[in-house]
Structures are given as structure tokens and as C-alpha cells.
Image: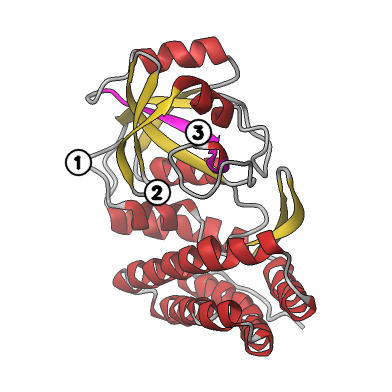
């Protein structure tokens, strides 16, 4: 939304940013239970934003910390010069139905103006031209319940292209970071831990995160990654990512219907694929490696 008409699309940006690579169990803000995320332990959304854009030759100005300065920036926002605001606490955005309380979930929105006491914005969660009262928006924008350390009232503006990079080149340049995110046993261990959590009984918020957010998002990002990496000739890695997408997507029905045995078995199969994907990417990158014990 911020770099149109030059954007390769949301799917490509998420893949370049590293979000599909891994599985982790993390604490999330005010939520008392650890939550599953289909991303690596060392991956954070702000890193993904910067990484994907840098790979494509873009940069931007970032500022955060001061409520008054942030509001001043928003008041200068226009449709031609919007502001990327976030992270914000998704649960505190009052135009999102059924929430109304902190859930530890981060989100970003594109602000294109302020009219009176209303923030005018496009919300990529599916709410274009949304309006939110300023005080409610500022409460969500403080981001003190988001599940990782962030500066409150963070803005990103003045998106500009410093060099032209085609998507194929950017995807190839993203491989070393994907390997780093998959390095070590963390994702496989997290898959086993999540299988045990499913068997022993998920908490309400853990179940909600999986069936309403994480399964659909995780499967979609891996499916996109499989298509994109396949398009540049990384066929072995693409096959593993497609299998991962199928496994994650197949969790939805058993978890919704309470078939914990099938869900746990699927997660254990998924756990073995993270090493497979790392090795396939290492082969693609031409790196010599030793097969782990």
C-alpha cells in the first residue's frame, strides 16, 4: 500500500521479509498463555518490513516514542503521502468486531488523514477507508501489550526507491536470511511442544489464535513462498514449503472439531520438515553443510 504502483504484492513482501520460515511458541503481551506462531523465534514483524523493502531497494524514515510528534505526523498525512502507523494492538482497534480488549496481536495500518476527532485509514485486515476515534487509536498505538518490545507511536514515512531490484534477484538475496531463521532445532522443538499442548488441552486464547489467525496465515504464506521460490528454480525448497503449507492447512478441521490426535500427529510430521527445508535452501545457495545427527 505504501509503495504502489511498484509493489510486488503482499505475498512477495511477506516472503521476502522472512515470515514463512519457522514455528515458535512465544509469550504475547497481556495474554497469560504462550501462543503458537508460524514464524521463527528470531523473526519480528518490524524486521520483516525493513528486510523486504531493503531487498527491493527501498528505504523509509522511521520515528517513534512521542505521542505529540506522532499525531503531528498523522495530521500531515494525505492520500498522496500516507503514513504507515504501527505496531498497534489489534484487540484495541474499535472497528474490529468481537475484540475490544488487548490480545497481544500486532497490526499496522495506513493513515491518510485526520478529520476532527477521527483517524482516516486503510486497514489491510480488510477495512479500507476505516475511521477510528483519535483517543482509541492512540491507546492501541501505544502498543504496550504487543508481544515483543516496540517503541510506541511508531511511524514510517517518505518511502523512496534508492535502487531498482527485480523480484527474482530479491528472492535469491533473501535465501541466506531464510536459512538463518531455520537454523537450529527451535522450529522442530516448537512443533513437538505444540503437539503436546494440543494433546493436553489448549487454552481458549491458544485455540483462538490457531484456528482464527495462525493456521490460515501460516499456510497462506508458505503456499506463496512455494510458488515464488518455484518460479526462480528453487524446486526442492518449493516442494518442502508446499508440503508444509498442506500440513498446516490440514490442522484447521481437526482442531475445530476436537480431533486432537490427528492434529498432534500432523504437527509432529511438520516438525521434521524444517530441517528438510533448511537443507534444501542450503543446496540452492550452494553452501557446503554437514548433515545433523
Residue at image location 64% in from the left, 40% down from the top:
146
Q: Count how many numbered circles sit on residues in the image.
A: 3
Which of the image's four quarters has the C terminus? bottom right
Separation of residues labelled 1 and 3 (CA atoms): 22 Å
| Residue that mark 1 sits on | 5
* As drawn, 105 above or below 223: above
As rendered, which of 200 and 154 lies closer to the eye? Answer: 200
Residue 16 within the segment the image draws in magenta:
no
| Residue that mark 2 sits on | 125
Disc 1, SS:
loop
| Residue that mark 3 sits on | 86
Magenta region, residue range: 81-91
N-term-proximal mark, 3 vs 2: 3
Residue at image location 47% in from the left, 71% down from the top:
219
Separation of residues labelled 3 and 2 (CA atoms): 13 Å
N-term-proximal mark, 1 vs 3: 1
User: Given this view, does label 2 or label 1 mark the residue nearer the observer?
Assistant: 2
Q: Does the CB distance between marks 1 and 3 fall below 8 Å?
A: no
Q: Is residue 186 left or right of residue 207?
A: right
The disc label shown at residue 116, or none: none
Separation of residues labelled 2 and 1 (CA atoms): 20 Å
Disc 3, SS:
strand
- Percent x, y of residue 191: 69, 74
N-term-proximal mark, 2 vs 1: 1
- Percent x, y of residue 78: 27, 20
As rendered, which of 172 and 5 lies closer to the eye? Answer: 5
Amino acid at each position: 500500500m505504501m509503495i504502489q504502483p511498484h509493489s510486488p504484492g503482499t505475498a512477495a513482501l511477506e516472503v521476502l521479509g522472512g515470515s514463512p520460515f519457522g514455528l515458535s511458541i512465544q509469550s504475547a503481551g497481556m495474554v497469560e498463555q504462550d501462543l503458537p506462531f508460524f514464524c521463527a523465534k528470531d523473526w519480528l514483524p518490524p524486521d520483516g518490513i525493513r528486510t523486504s523493502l531493503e531487498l527491493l531497494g527501498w528505504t523509509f524514515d522511521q520515528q517513534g516514542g512521542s505521542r505529540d510528534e506522532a499525531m503531528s505526523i498523522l495530521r500531515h498525512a494525505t492520500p498522496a503521502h500516507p503514513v504507515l502507523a504501527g505496531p498497534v494492538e489489534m484487540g484495541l482497534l474499535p472497528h474490529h468486531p468481537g475484540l475490544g480488549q488487548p490480545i497481544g496481536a500486532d497490526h499496522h495500518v495506513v493513515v491518510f488523514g485526520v478529520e476532527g476527532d477521527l483517524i482516516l485509514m486503510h486497514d489491510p485486515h480488510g477495512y479500507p477507508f476505516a475511521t477510528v476515534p483519535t483517543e482509541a487509536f492512540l491507546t492501541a498505538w501505544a502498543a504496550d501489550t504487543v508481544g515483543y518490545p516496540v517503541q510506541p507511536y511508531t511511524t514510517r514515512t517518505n518511502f523512496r526507491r534508492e535502487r531498482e531490484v527485480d523480484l527474482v534477484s530479491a528472492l535469491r538475496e533473501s535465501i541466506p536470511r531464510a536459512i538463518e531463521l531455520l537454523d537450529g532445532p527451535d522450529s522442530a522443538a516448537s512443533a513437538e511442544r505444540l503437539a503436546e499442548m494440543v494433546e493436553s488441552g489448549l487454552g481458549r486464547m491458544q485455540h483462538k489464535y490457531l484456528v482464527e489467525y495462525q493456521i490460515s496465515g501460516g499456510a497462506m504464506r508458505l503456499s506463496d513462498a512455494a510458488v515464488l521460490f518455484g518460479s526462480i528454480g528453487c524446486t526442492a525448497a518449493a516442494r518442502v514449503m508446499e508440503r508444509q503449507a498442506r500440513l498446516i492447512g490440514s490442522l484447521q478441521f481437526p482442531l475445530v472439531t476436537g480431533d486432537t490426535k490427528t492434529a498432534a500427529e500432523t504437527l509432529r510430521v511438520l516438525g521434521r520438515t524444517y530441517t528438510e527445508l533448511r537443507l534444501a535452501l542450503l543446496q540452492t545457495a550452494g553452501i557446503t553443510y554437514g548433515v545433523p545427527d
